[in-house]
Image (cartoon, grey):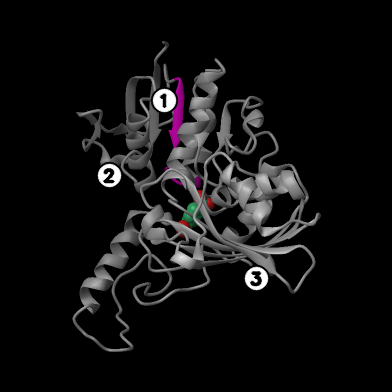
Amino acid sequence: MREYTVAVAGATGVVGQEMIKVLAERRFPVKRLLPLASQRSVGKEVEFQGSKVKVELLTKDSFEGVDIALFSAGAGVSKEIAPQAAKSGAIVIDNSSAFRMDPEVPLVVPEVNPQDAFGHKGIIANPNCSTIQMVVVLKPVHDAFGIERVVVSTYQSVSGWGKEAVDQLWNELEEIVSEHEPIVRKEIPRVLPYQIAFNLFPHIDVFMDEDYTKEEWKMVNETRKIMHSDIRVTATCVRVPVLISHSEAVNVQLREKAAVKEIRTVLSNAPGVIVEDDVLNNIYPMPLYAAGKDEVFVGRIRKDNTVDNGFWLWIVADNLRKGAALNAVQIAELLVKEGKV
Ligand code: L14
């Protein structure tokens, strides 16, 4: 079997680390792993398949001889360096928001639109974490019954922001935990807009048009692009004090009549989806239990009687795995399987 030189740009970040872990776990055919990062991380080592690999400086010239480049170093870095990596002959799979809505760049979730990947011109975009887990569930429902409209509220973990936000939550908890007061506010240095310990806020990424956040617009636009549909989506994205996994309360309005049982059956047969829906036994998905898993979990499937053909879904997945690193590696696997690398 052919083996590939795989670069990971942003190798020391939370997603970069997860990418390296997932490559090893899934025995991706790696001939050489090239961990790349900014000056700050040069000289550090990452673990790959039991050995230590030195992190090298990420520059435009890092990609000679690289077959596949997984990028997760932020949109600015991707915009600057990914096109050059592609020119050097690498296929870039980019986890940032830099190219997602570029009409020349496919936006791919392998369970949903694998064919799009093959139309790339050197760069393939990995969708936003909240969008990925939602479309994995919406696609089979859309194929079976047609989806007219989606109203979603998210409950997003701090790891989506990155390592510093994870540290922020830990630091706040350590400061607060001994106080036993109902209201504890601490002014501790932070990267998120407010204290997140014992708090939440409806603010992820920056505010944009019509007072929606960029994260909310991503869910609207990326869903439509991935599903090749003009499906109407509206979102409220909320940060919660959870370390790993995003949760979503998703209200869908279907075109056709459906029974809860039929939706459950469709989702039970859907790739990458696990139905956890047995309320008599308190069974429903939760972030703590989705963390570390590859699948997207769905439960609380029930009718919304306020509209025709309305239903609720509760969708949970590990944002670092299916929401980021795993999806990127699955795109690479798709290319390998079809002999397109
Ligand atoms: O990939 O949780 O567009 O703050 C940007 C911000 C994902 C999550 C993206 C966060 C994201 C994120």
**Residue in the image at 26% along x and 37% along y:** 42
**Residue in the image at 45% along x and 29% along y:** 69
Location of residue 306 with respect to 338 vertically, above or below: below
Q: What residue type is labelled 1?
A: Asp
**Residue in the image at 66% along x and 42% along y:** 226
Residue 202 in sight in this render = yes
User: Which part of the image, by quadrant, shows the N terminus?
Assistant: top left
Q: Mark 2 points at which residue?
A: 40
Residue projecting furthest to the bottom:
182
Location of residue 19 with respect to 87 vertically, above or below: below
Asked if the residues shown at circle 2 and circle 1 are in contact, with their CB atoms under 8 angstroms apart, the answer is no
What whole-number distance in Å separates the C-alpha atoms at marks 3 and 2?
Answer: 36 Å
Numbered mark located on residue 61 in the image: 1
Q: What residue type is labelled 2?
A: Arg
Residue at disc 1, secondary structure: loop
Location of residue 243 with respect to 46 vertically, above or below: below
What residue span does the magenta drawing correspond to?
67-75
- Is residue 70 a member of the stretch shown in magenta? yes
Residue at disc 3, secondary structure: helix
Question: As rendered, which of 191 and 146 lies closer to the eye?
Answer: 146
Does mark 2's beta carbon lie closer than 8 Å to ligand 1? no
Q: Which amino acid does label 3 sit on?
A: Asp
Percent coordinates x, y for residue 223 in the rendering: 66, 49
Percent coordinates x, y for residue 224 in the rendering: 71, 48
Of the numbered discs 2 and 1, the one sitting upstream in the chain is 2
Residue 205 in sight in this render = no
Location of residue 118 with respect to 236 vertically, above or below: above
Of the numbered discs 3 and 2, the one sitting upstream in the chain is 2
